[in-house]
Amino acid sequence: MSVKNAAKQVIDALPEGASLDDVLRALAGAGSAERGEPELRAGQIRAERSPGEPPRAGDSSACGAAEAALANAHHDFQAILDAAPVMIACKSCDDHFIHVNAAFSRFVGLPTEQILGMTTFELVGQREVAQQGREHDLEVIRSGIPVVNQLVKWSGRGNPEGIWAQYSKLPLRDAAGTVVGTVSFVQDVDARVRAEEALRQSRSQLQSILEATTDAVFLKDLTGRFVLVNTAVCRFVGKSAAEIVGRDPTAIFPEAQARALMDRDRRVLAAGTSSTAEEYVTTADGVERTFLATKGPVFDAQGKLIGLFGISRDITERKQMEDRLRQAEKLAGIGQLAGGIAHNFNNQLTSILGFADLLLAGLDDQKFRGYALQILSSSRRAAELTAQLLAFARKGKYRSESIDLQRLIGETVSLLQQSIDKRIEIRQHFDTGHAVVLGDPPQLRDMLLNLGLNARDAMPAGGQLRFETAAIGLGQAEAVALGVEPGRYLRIAVSDSGVGMNADTQKHLFEPFFTTKSPGQGTGLGLAAVHGIVASHRGGITARSEPGQGSTFTIYLPLHGEAMSLDAEASAAAPGAVPKARVLLVDDEEGVLRLAAEMLRISGHETICCNDGAEALGRYRELGGQIDLVILDVVMPKLGGRDTFAALRQMNPAVKVLVSSGYSIDGEARSILADGALGFLPKPYNRAELVGKVAEALGGGRSPGSP
């Protein structure tokens, strides 16, 4: 076997990752073994004379044979070095190259003969690299200690762009052990360095992404302990990465939550596929939050399962918004039904209340008067319930005025102080000088009273009831969460220090007929009506409570201009006496028609009754010049109130019309008023209310509650 082949076998047998020193020792051993000679010393690399040099005078044949043997040994060792996968170069102490292998020559782009005798500075074009190499040479020569694994960007004539190279320098010694130079082993590690740099950049980019995301990202080992966490994880749990890594969820979360998390981890690992599900954990702020967590198995390069990854997004606010939307949709559906029922009830109650009122006026017998009064009392309570239903359905607003809500709160507090336990302290804190909203004063007063009375019931042993106001601005995100338009709002907070509510109770707070009170002690319409009143005033409401920690209801109402003054309100007095008039009554409810006709007849007016809009248009076309006022129901079959009013205006642009409805002033009624109707008459009504509205309309004015 040739020395070159022997060297190749030795090199091929080296383990992956063998060092340059390993290569050198293996090559030296291979050369000595092949020739049956003792192991070569590094000092023997340099021969006494160069190959091909003629014998000196006086050499004997034995000397010639030795010379030949030495030349052969040199040739064989050169073959071994040329077979090495690394670049090898020997230099003298005075920095001259005295031996290089083929790999070195190829890289620098010069033949071996030209390299020998050159200095580092002559061969290496990069002065900084040459200077560093020479300093290492001198350090090795001076100390006799190798310099190993130095990384340098090195270019040669054969590779002008340069490569990343790793070199080691060893002392070169003669037979006596004296350092006579250096041996350098240079390995091309360009691909490895570039791959490592690419890996570093990739890791850096990945780390930047992990730290920039607001999602919690983590890795766990097979025992469930955290191996890696990003900043979001630390922020959510309120601990540093050092406090999290190496621990399992039981050291971070409450026991029940931790067990639930670990059970899901085990299911994901057992399935061997990723899955997404909601998880619940208590974060650093002490609040249980909802996370949408995607988890999956992690495998190594050989496909062995080594752990689990997780990406969790906080969806608490989204879930709350979805819950509010579902609640709003549910309440809207219930409200539609409740509004229709209340409207029909109001039509019936109009007849009951009105005829009971007329009956009472015509009775002298005290016994029968008592019966009539009981009918009126019960009917009024029923009317209050329908008013609450309409408020819940957002159809109970009859007036629209500028109101100083802080003044209204003061009036409400005065009422509460007369009717609640003296152990309850009521406080007011107003943090704004402008608290004017546009709305229906009685409804807003009912809203405040409802909240105050609910607070009273939540404090059976006494406590503190607090009303607070502040003017604030709501941005887009806050407004969307409340279901309102962005803008300036008055925030009204009504807080108590009572028994509080659990989460399940809070989910049903604003549903009609839901109550936590004992049977017979509540209708379950109070908070439903509050919700409807707030919504009909284009506002929003939230509730916050915990068992034993009291409750806070926060209402947001759009701020408006200046409030109507008391003088202005008082000046809207009813006009004086008016002449008798002919009134066209239009309503699809026969009982309401008969009642209104009788009430107006008693008051001296003449009436013409029509059951629908089409009939009314025919009578007005026939008698228009003789009709002084039209009282027009809004909701009718065949032809509704709005279309009937438009047709009446075409016949007579100066026609006088009062709008009447069992619904609120909003919706169809408001559009008719905006088109020129004189006032609004809500059902149910009594004789005094009906006659008063007629007097206002015939007197040329509008009722105080008209827009």
Image (spheres, rainbow, N blue to C red):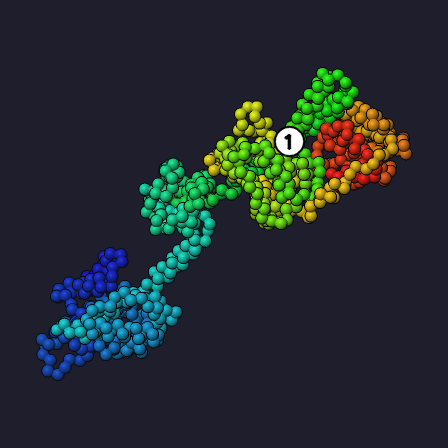
| Vertical comparison of 474 with 440: above or below | below
Residue 680 sits in quarter:
top right
* Element type at mark 1: helix
Query: Label 1: how many residues lie within 10 Å, few (<14), some (14-19) or many (20+)?
Result: many
Find disc 1 in the rendering and name its residue.
388
Q: Quadrant of the N terminus?
A: bottom left
Q: Residue 632, how many percent across, how many down?
A: 79, 32
Q: Name the foreground residue: 94 vs 64.
A: 94
Q: Is residue 534 left or right of residue 185?
A: right
Q: Is residue 285 left or right of residue 489?
A: left
Which residue does the image show at 62% across and 41% down from the upper left? Answer: 410
Which residue does the image show at 56% across and 26% down from the upper left? Answer: 521
Q: Name the foreground residue: 366 vs 487.
A: 366
Which residue does the image show at 27% across and 65% down from the upper left? Answer: 149
Q: Amino acid at mark 1?
A: Gln
Q: Quadrant of the C terminus?
A: top right
Q: Residue 659, how many percent across, how many down?
A: 77, 34
| Vertical comparison of 217 with 452: above or below | below
Q: Residue 332, how many percent across, how many down?
A: 62, 34
| Vertical comparison of 574 with 113: above or below | above
Check the image and name the residue furthest to the bottom.
Answer: 57
Residue 468 visible, this orientation? yes
Residue 385 sits in quarter:
top right
Q: Residue 507, how many percent across, how many down?
A: 53, 34
